[in-house]
Amino acid sequence: MQQPLVFIGHGLWLQMATAIVAKHLQPFGYPCIAIELPAKAKEPAAMAGGPELVTLCQMLGLPLQLVLARAQATFSLGSQYQSGDSSWFVPFGHYGLNAAAAEFEQAILQLLRLDANSKAEQFCIAALAASQGKFALAPANRPDLAEALSYGLHLQTAEFAACLKHYNQQLGVTFLSSQTVEMKYSAEGQISTLQLDNGTALPVGYCLDCRTEPAADEASHTVQLFCAQDTTVLLQQPHSSVLQTSWGWLVRLPLQQGSHWFSQCTDPTLELSHFRQELQQLTGLSEWQHSTRQQPTESQPWQLNHLRFGQAAATLDCPLYNGLNALQYLLIRWLDLLPNQSYCPATALMYNQHWQQFQSEVQDFLWLHQHPLATKTGQAFARLGRVLSTETDAIKAGQWFGLMQGLGLKPELRSMLLAHRTDTEIHQGLRQVQQQIARLVTAMPSQIDTLNRCLQQLSH
């Protein structure tokens, strides 16, 4: 019998971490214990996950139809951005019909430079489908179409957490509740036991800490959070909506019944009245909930047998990027290394370095939203029209391209390959792709029809 893997935390983050690890390790004799602690802050009512979330459900064996029904979920092909009079779509999938067509995005940029009336969304299946309220699951014999239509989900947080908890209980995970937990350390600095409020002392192999709040003596910064619920049903919109505000961005997540708005601000000098007034002007809603939280700065999540995954993922958590994606990366990466780790300091060091790369990539993407040319990625795109190669795939290629062209970054240099093609040849090629995309989208069902079909399959 192995020493138990002990998870501590609350809500969806605890349930997701437990499900991923228990699914992989319980068959090998690793007992899993989840300690549910009181939440210091209320979880958001809704969440958005990218294609990673869909992959996770497939990996766990959770039927898509079950998740759609239990969590009032809707599909998401990406995000529709609005900044003043400008609007653009940021997809999860790629542009064009072939992901391997490296120069296709360069051709789009060249067209945008020559024709101010053209839009990049014309050449993206996901963007065109989202604008028409359409969504289809790609057939098994069309992996190319599945990649172009990469999708995520909008979910009710509490219902999805309950779904995962039921899954964990079926796996045989032991659940305990405690108001507090105290860590006892060995002479080597490892956690030896966890002391609960009823006096129970649990031995620990690894402690997977899913708590998102930093300790009082740890570095953090304060962020202000705003959220509101909207009863308007938006089943014709298989995407998130992102609106620019004077302090940042406002995100809307549509569910099967209504939608939820979220925004975040790190400027402590702005008055609440300023937020409320602008939020009401943008949305027409007057009832906004306001709260604050301490956002940690964890960059060394693996410390001996204490895995501070919750705090690490929470460094990136915001309305524009769900920290659960980062948590999933942290867990899967750790599981990849588990057979050879044996508490090896070098393995932990390598792991933390990989996490810092992931963290840096997401922070770069988030910073692009505020100051595109203050980032190396934005500078490279404005010069060459390309995204710097990344190692972690934290942000999809379509997201990078969609955001930066939408923000108005136009490369100074033309593609060397396209330099040997005339503008007429490039335009003809683009139009042929555009026509094929239009035909594919015309034949697609609406998101409402696809949702209904999935839910009917569950009832049968």
Image: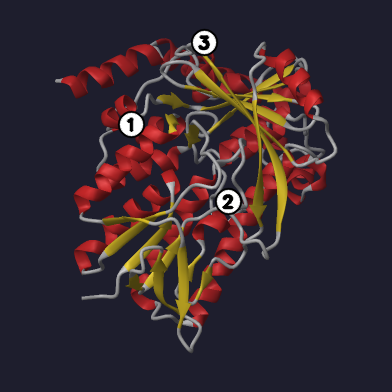
Q: Residue at x 37, y 21 (%)?
A: 136
Q: Earlier in the sequence, mark 3 or mark 2?
A: 3
- Nearest to the observer: residue 455 or residue 406: 455
Q: Position of residue 196 (x, y in %)?
A: 39, 65
Marked residue nearer the N-terminal end (2 or 1)? 1
Residue at 49 percent across and 88 percent down: it is 188
The residue lying at 74 percent from left, 13 percent from top is 281
Circle 1: residue type: Arg
> Which label belongs to residue 177?
none
* Residue at numbered disc 1: 142
User: Mark 3 against mark 1, which lies toward the viewer?
Assistant: 3
Which image quarter is the N terminus in?
bottom left
Which structural element holds mark 2? Answer: helix
The answer to whether residue 380 is seen in the rendering is yes
Mark 1 falls on what kind of element?
Answer: loop
Mark 3 lies on a secondary structure that is loop
Q: Residue 177: percent from the left, percent from the top?
A: 35, 54
The residue beneath circle 3 is: 232
Which residue is rendered at x = 40% and y = 16% of the image? 447
Please provide percent x and percent y for residue 142. 33, 31
Is disc 3 in contact with disc 2, using a CB cutoff of under 8 Å? Answer: no
Looking at marks 3 and 1 on the same chain, the residue that comes earlier in the sequence is marked by 1
In terms of depth relative to the viewer, which is nearer, 309 or 430? 309
* Type of amino acid under label 2: Ala
Q: Residue type at mark 3?
A: Thr
Name the outermost residue toward the right: 269
Tell me the quadrant of the picture where the C terminus can be found. top left
Q: Is residue 183 above or below residue 156?
A: below
- Which of the numbered marks, if any, corresponds to residue 314? 2
